[in-house]
Amino acid sequence: MPEGRRCWTVGRASAPASSANQAGPPLTRMRRPARNALRLGAHNHDATFYRRRLPHLRVDGAIYFVTWRVRSGQPDLSDGEREEVVAAIRAFDDDCYVLHAYVVMNDHVHVILEPLSDFRLEAILHAWKSFTANRLQRGYRRRGAVWQAESFDRVVRDEAEYEQKRDYILSNPSRRWPDIESYRWSWVLGLDQPEP
């Protein structure tokens, strides 16, 4: 991990001194699966399945497509709020996860990412949602829960599915707003796009 950039633990009273001023969400290291988790031995990968309202599958070394939404009753995200979400998503790219693509829409977010071996997807999502909710409440006067409690996640199973999810992210703004020519809150690894 590069000097001066660290991922820290959710729930810690304070961040390490070297990262106290770092703009980004706190993250936890992997923990054991919950007692009610089902261990699977599929495809020579360690996998865990658990369920809240939605089913969740965790596979070591997997790439995930994730989605979370603004909570019902909350107004759409403003331009400035979308910038905050993008900054949080990009904060620990290559330190805690490899970011493949994202789009921050007015009422939801899609991300393709690959958690690094020491980091759990649910911890990364919790960090993004908690950090951005706090920033949006303080900086944009939002009240109450900003995001829906649960997120949708899916293991990307092969190259064809990866391309389909990537293309879905790229086309999401133009499907919502057909006349739009560019959208600054989306990014895909490997495409010639300016860094946000």
Image (cartoon, rainbow, N blue to C red):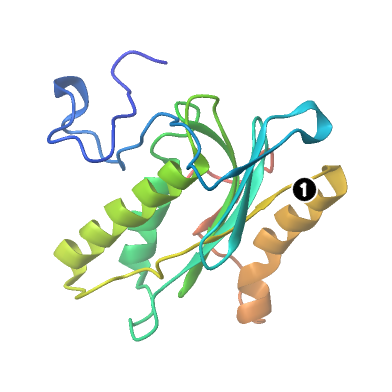
Q: Residue furthest front?
A: 35
Is residue 87 in sight in this rendering?
no
Viewer-proximal residue among 76 and 12: 12
In which quadrant of the rendered image does the N terminus lie?
top left
Residue 75 picture location, percent across and down: 34, 82
Residue 67 picture location, percent across and down: 55, 61
Is residue 47 in sight in this rendering?
yes
Residue at the (19%, 35%) spot, across then down = 12
In this figure, what is the number of numbered marks?
Answer: 1
Residue 90 picture location, percent across and down: 44, 42
**What residue sits right under mark 1 in the picture?**
162
Work out whether 25 lies above or below 74: above
Residue at the (50%, 37%) spot, across then down = 33
Mark 1 crowdedness (10 Å alpha carbons): few <14, some 14-19, many ≥20: some
Say what secondary structure mark 1 lies in.
Answer: helix
Residue at the (84%, 43%) spot, across then down = 159
Left or right relative to 144: residue 70: right
